[in-house]
Amino acid sequence: MSKVYFAGLSSSTKEDNLISRIKKLFEITGEGISYKGNELIALKVHFGEKGIDTYLRPVQVAPIAEAVKEAGGKPFLSDTNTLYRGSRANAVDHHRTAQDNGWLRPVVDAPVVIADGLHGHEFYIVNINGEHYSEVKIGAAFLQADGIIGVSHFKGHGLTGFGGTLKNLGMGCGSRAGKLIMHCDVNPVVKKEKCIACGKCAEWCPADAISVAQYAEIDLEKCIGCGECKIVCPENAIKVEDTSETEKVQEKIAEYALGAIKGKENKSLYYNFITDVTPECDCPPWRKAPIVPDIGIVASRDPVAVDQAAYDLVNQTKGSEFQTEVDKFEKLHNINPAIQLKHAEKIGLGKRDYKLIDIS
C-alpha cells in the first residue's frame, strides 16, 4: 500500500498556511531524497495557455523549488511543446506565454526550460517494456534531468476523463512526435446539429484537417488524432464515437509516463493540486466552472496512487451538478478514466491501493 499525503486548504496562522504546507508535503513525502553534486531537477508543470487562469499559480510552485534547493538540487521549470496551434507550439512562444502567466524570477527561483527544444524535435528514445510500446520518445531535458517533480493541476479532460500526474508525465514529457503517436488512434466526429461554425476547431488544428462552412468538417485522411478540436469546441459538438480509442490513449499515456521517470524513481515525487477542478484541461484559452469546490493537495512517491487518491477525493465531494456516488469524470465525458490507473498499475508504474495521511 502506497502512502499519499494530503494537505487541506484552510489554515489560520502564517506558520501553517498553504505555502508552508506545500513545502511540508515535500519534506514528508520526499523524506530520504537528497540531491548530490548540484543535480538538475525538473519541475514538470503546465505553464497555462494564454487566456486561461486555472493553471497552477507560480507562487504555489515556488516552495517546491525552494525545497529542491534545500535538498541540494538545482530546480528548473519545464514542459514540452504542444501539437496544436496555441501559444506554446514552439519554444519562443512557449517562453513568452510562461512569462505572461507569471513564471518568472523572483516569484519562482527556477529558470524555464522547454524540454524538447525550439520546434519540439529534441528527444531521446527510452526503452520500456510496455504493451503498446517497446520504446518512447521523451523530451531531451526530462531525460537529462536527474529527477522529476511532477506538479500537476488535477482536472477533467476530454480524451482521458481526468488529467493528473500520469497525464502530466506521459503526455507532458513526450516530445511532439511522441504526442502524435499517443493520439494516432483517435478519430473525432462532428455533431452537425450542435456545431455553430465558430471556427475554433479549425484555428487550433495543427494538420489543417478542418474546414468550416455551415458546420465544421474533418478530413480524416489529414487528421492526426490529437483531439484538440474536441477539447476546444465550446459547444461539445465534436465527439470520439469509439470509446476504445480513448482507452488506448490512456494506456499509451501511462506507458510514456513509465518512460519519463525511468531511472529517476528514487529522486522523484508527485503533487496533485485538486483546485479549480474544471471539466476540461488548461489548454483552451478559456475556462468552464469547476465541478466541485476546491479540495486540497495530495503528494506521493507513487504516481499511480497520487492520481487514484485525487480521483477518489473528487468523486467523494458533492458538486453543483453531481452527487457523491457519481463518477463525475465519466459522466462528463462518457469515458472510463480508471483505464489509465489500471494500466499504469499493470505495467509496474505504481499501486492503486493507498493510505491517505492528512498533514493539515
Image (cartoon, rainbow, N blue to C red):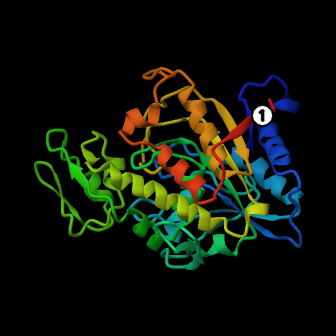
The answer to whether residue 52 is visible is yes
Q: Residue at x 57, y 42 (%)?
A: 154
- Describe residue 85's horizontal placement relative to residue 88 as left or right: left
Instruction: From the top left corner, tell me how far across and down residue 356 is, in percent.
Output: 73, 34
Q: Residue at x 88, y 63 (%)?
A: 72
Instruction: Tell me the quarter of the image containing the C terminus.
Output: top right
- Describe residue 341's horizontal placement relative to residue 266 as left or right: left
Q: Looking at the image, how many numbered discs can be counted on the residues?
A: 1
Please tell me whether residue 147 is drawn above or below residue 327 in the rendered image.
below
- Describe residue 26's horizontal placement relative to residue 230 as left or right: right
Instruction: From the top left corner, tell me how far across and down residue 176 is, in percent.
Output: 46, 70
Please tell me whether residue 261 is drawn above or below residue 310 in the rendered image.
below
Q: Which residue carries the number 1 mark?
A: 357
Q: Residue at x 66, y 54 (%)?
A: 150
Helix, strand, or loop for circle 1? strand
Mark 1: few/some/many CA within 10 Å (<14, 14-19, 20+) = few
Q: Amino acid at mark 1?
A: Ile
Q: Nearer the viewer, residue 97 or 303?
A: 303
Q: Nearer the viewer, residue 148 or 79?
A: 148
The answer to whether residue 95 is visible is no
Please tell me in which quadrant of the rendered image residue 305 appears: top right
Instruction: From the top left corner, tell me how far across and down residue 130 is, in percent.
Output: 53, 67
Instruction: From the top left corner, tell me how far across and down residue 240 is, in percent.
Output: 29, 50
Please tell me whether residue 333 is drawn above or below residue 226 in the rendered image.
above
Instruction: Tell me the quarter of the image containing the N terminus.
Output: top right
